Image (cartoon, helix red, strand yellow):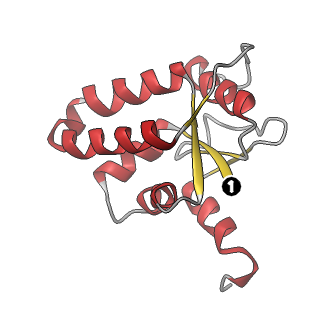
Amino acid sequence: MIRVVFDTSVLYSAILKPKSLPAAVFDFVTSGLLIPCVSPAVLAEYRDVLLERPALRPYARQAQHVLDIVASVALEVTPSQRLRISDHESDNRFYECADAASADYIITGNLKHFKYSHKNTQVVSPRQFMELMAGPHREK
């Protein structure tokens, strides 16, 4: 099973645009192909952004549904060390979660904040992840 850490931007986009690539990537969670990995800090950010941002208030039910899915299937970890990989301090919480969970990927819609892979965790966009999932059978 593939372990992933979703940057909040992916879940945000999946909620706002149910037919988008981020939504398609999240569908891999509900189909059992991905294990989302979370830490207390990552869950706190998810809740803060997805439930408290004014732009998502009209989508509160969908946001809560996404959070419920994540909570029900996620591998919950407690990072044992602080990392300083991203220039954006809050984004380091996602690296710490990925490190503690030995995640295969951090999936983000914001590659400029997640410039570096870490250990065996690759940083990819939803589009790159979909291409990886398509494997060698994808059309060029």
Image check: 30 left or right of 135?
Answer: left
Q: Is residue 128 above or below residue 16?
A: below
Dot 1: what SS?
loop
Mark 1, Cα crowd under 10 Å, few <14 / some 14-19 / many 20+, is few
Quadrant where the N terminus sits is bottom right
User: Where is residue 55 shown, x and y percent of the image?
Assistant: 22, 37
User: Where is residue 131 shown, x and y percent of the image?
Assistant: 64, 69
**Could you tell me which residue is drawn at 63 percent across and 45 percent down?**
4
Number of numbered discs on residues: 1
* Quarter assignment of residue 91: top right
Image check: 139 left or right of 117?
Answer: left
**Could you tell me which residue is drawn at 84 percent across and 36 percent down?**
119
Farthest residue toward the front? 72
User: Where is residue 116 shown, x and y percent of the image?
Assistant: 75, 37
Farthest residue toward the right? 119
Farthest residue toward the left? 58
Image check: 133 left or right of 40?
Answer: right
User: Please, what is the three-letter code of the amino acid marked with disc 1?
Assistant: Met
Q: Is residue 16 above or below residue 119?
A: below
Front in this rendered view, residue 60 or 128: 60
* Quarter assignment of residue 66: top left
Q: Is residue 89 above or below residue 5?
A: above
Q: Which residue is mark 1?
A: 1
**Could you tell me which residue is drawn at 68 percent across and 29 percent down?**
95
**Could you tell me which residue is drawn at 73 percent across and 14 percent down?**
80
Q: Is residue 44 above or below residue 56?
A: above
Front in this rendered view, residue 133 or 113: 133
Quadrant where the C terminus sits is bottom right
Image check: 67 left or right of 117?
Answer: left
User: Where is residue 126 shown, x and y percent of the image?
Assistant: 55, 56
